[in-house]
Amino acid sequence: MSDPPGTNPIGTHPIGSDPTGTGPTQSGTTGSYPKYAQTRPGHAEPAIEVLEHAWPVRLTHWLMAASILLMIGSGWRIYNASPIFPFRFPDAFTLGGDVNVALTWHNDPGVASAIQWHFAAMWLLALSYLLFVAWGALSGHFRRDFLPVGPQSFLRDFIAAARFKLEHHLGEYNAVQKVFYWGALALVLLMIVSGIAIWKPVQTYPLEVLFGGFQGARIVHFLGMAGICGFIVVHLALVALVPTTLVAMVVGRVTGHAPLAGHATADAMEHPP
């Protein structure tokens, strides 16, 4: 028997569409192109799902990653010269050259070199951050992949993640990831603004007042750094659990098994169109 007119015998449809017309579906894509899945007759699960990252996302991601690591290492060396709290970071984990050599040749524990690294990385971070935010806003990446997100879905996914029962689907950000990414973007912005307040306390006096003075800006800067370090630990742990996401961030595209077509996410139910 032939198929009715207008049907597709192999069931090819875009992921995120609802071929049955009976309910809500998955959220969009992570790149500039739509994702497609192929199903076999009598099977509800698509064969393929695709995770794509456009080249501006990948470029700015790696530039921000490199600049953040440079700023953390150099920042720890600068912190050690005038600690805020009663501890110092091991010199081996800081950036600024060999401490003993720097003391011998320059009578300085490498702080001057660390400051040079810090400022160089700061400009790289600011530029890549602005490019990433501009691309995310103009291309629809933020709206498509980081929104919507609600407290109910975040709590549900957070509990599932804590119990190691949170499912992961390529091309689909869960609520925990969405909140963490928004938090990371806010922390980077906080680090840039507080860093400017520390760098130019007189010229940026209103920022000094906002942070409660020079020492307050230093404390905010330090706590922001701690938050970013925490994000990096969680981010790397998730990459270790789902290594295909690293492949996508390097080469731009990776495929895998797709979730059920027509599956409704909590975000979609909390924020219906």
Image (cartoon, rainbow, N blue to C red):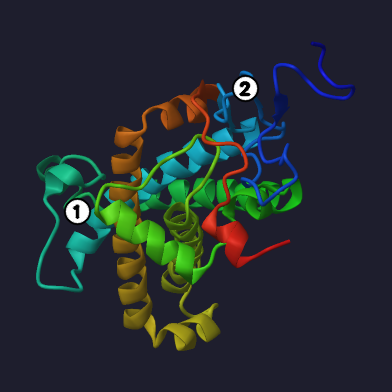
The image's mark for residue 39 is 2
What is the quadrant of residue 82 in the picture? bottom left
SS at circle 1? loop
Q: Position of residue 16 (x, y in %)?
A: 67, 41
| Residue 227 drawn above or below residue 84 | above
SS at circle 2? loop
Q: Position of residue 212 (x, y in %)?
A: 39, 88
Which residue is rendered at x = 47% and y = 63% of the image? Answer: 153
Name the residue tied to disc 1: 108
Q: Amino acid at mark 2?
A: Thr
The image's mark for residue 270 is none
| Residue 57 drawn above or below residue 11 | below
Which residue is rendered at x = 51% and y = 35% of the image? Answer: 259
Q: Nearer the viewer, residue 201 or 192?
A: 192
| Residue 193 drawn above or below residue 19 | below
**Circles 2, 1 touching at the beta carbon (< 8 Å):** no
Q: Position of residue 150 (x, y in %)?
A: 53, 67
Q: Position of residue 202 (x, y in %)?
A: 49, 80
What is the quadrant of residue 52 in the picture? top right
Horizontal side of residue 82 vs 11, given as left or right = left
Residue lying furthest front: 1
Q: Nearer the viewer, mark 2 or mark 1?
A: 2
Q: Quadrant where the C terminus lies?
A: bottom right
Q: Earlier in the sequence, mark 2 or mark 1?
A: 2
Residue lying furthest right: 5
Disc 2 to disc 1, C-alpha distance:
66 Å
Q: Nearer the viewer, residue 191 or 8?
A: 8
Q: Is residue 78 visible?
A: yes
Which residue is rendered at x = 19% and y = 63% of the image? Answer: 81
